[in-house]
Amino acid sequence: MHKGFKISLVAAMSENRVIGRANDIPWRAKGDFRFFKEATIGKPLIMGRKTFESLENGGTQPLPGRPNIVVTTRKDYQYDHPDVSIHHSYDDALDYAAKLAEEMGVDEICIGGGAEIYKLSLPTADIIHLTEIHCTVEDGDTFFPAFPKDDWQESRREFVAAEEGDTADYSFVTWERRSA
Ligand SMILES: NC(=O)c1ccc[n+]([C@@H]2O[C@H](COP(=O)([O-])OP(=O)(O)OC[C@H]3O[C@@H](n4cnc5c(N)ncnc54)[C@H](OP(=O)(O)O)[C@@H]3O)[C@@H](O)[C@H]2O)c1
């Protein structure tokens, strides 16, 4: 818990832990996109600058209905939109997300990737929503970080068959941090 807020990572990875390829997501799983939206809507969402720029329309549209909290080292990085804020460290982004969560009356902050930001945020996380996409991506270039199973317990697993247009079947999996 960070100042009374639950921190949830929301991600999807292939069987060989790939989450991205060429700054894009290398599969199509419509139900998982719906899950990402449902899990993050109405909550502060922290993401890395590369993920932000990979969003629909080449990063010219923030994800609607939730504050887009973007982390970058670039001091001159600007994005003029009321739902977008720019931060130069994960800690600063997290403090800002906690302030917004309080104002919004929610008790959860979401982390939307990519690999660099999942890695930075993992030590602070309480929950990992990690959809397992049942395929292998040979030419992936970004991977979900390893997390020690001694510290994490699987609390949900639900298999979903591919629907028309999907690349593969997948499973919704939730991991919760074991209490000390
Ligand atoms: N499958 C999934 O669930 C999922 C989810 C999200 C993203 N993705 C994929 O993941 C890939 C992008 O991931 P990525 O790891 O390459 O990039 P990323 O984590 O989205 O963003 C990395 C950027 O964050 C900034 N950053 C990182 N550490 C920082 C720090 N300590 N302080 C300040 N800024 C920091 C830097 O921005 P600057 O370079 O501007 O300094 C860095 O280049 C894409 O392929 C995307 O499609 C997949």
Image (cartoon, rainbow, N blue to C red):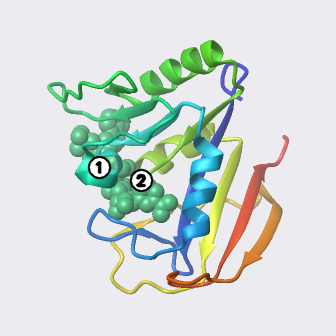
Q: Secondary structure at mark 2?
A: loop
Decide if ligand 1 comes within 8 Å of the CB at mark 2.
Answer: yes
Ligand 1 within 8 Å of the CB at mark 1: yes
Type of amino acid at the residue the image marks with label 1 = Lys
Report x, y in % for residue 102. 64, 15
Task: Kindly tell me whether residue 33 is visible in this rendering.
Answer: yes
Quadrant of the snapshot with the N terminus:
top right
Q: Quadrant of residue 142?
A: bottom left
Towards the viewer: 112 or 95: 112
Q: Residue furthest left?
A: 76
**Which mark, residue 114?**
2
Q: Is residue 151 visible?
A: no
* Residue 178 image offset from top left, x and y in percent: 82, 48
Residue contact between numbered discs 1 and 2, judged by CB atoms under 8 Å? yes
> Which label number is shown at residue 50?
1
* The residue positioned farthest toward the front in the image shown: 164
The picture places residue 180, in percent across and down from the top left corner, at: 84, 40
Residue sitting at 79 percent across and 71 percent down?
158
Q: Kindly report the distance in space between the C-alpha atoms of the residues bearing marks 1 and 2.
A: 7 Å
Please report the residue visible at 53 percent of the width from the left and 86 percent of the height from the top. Answer: 135
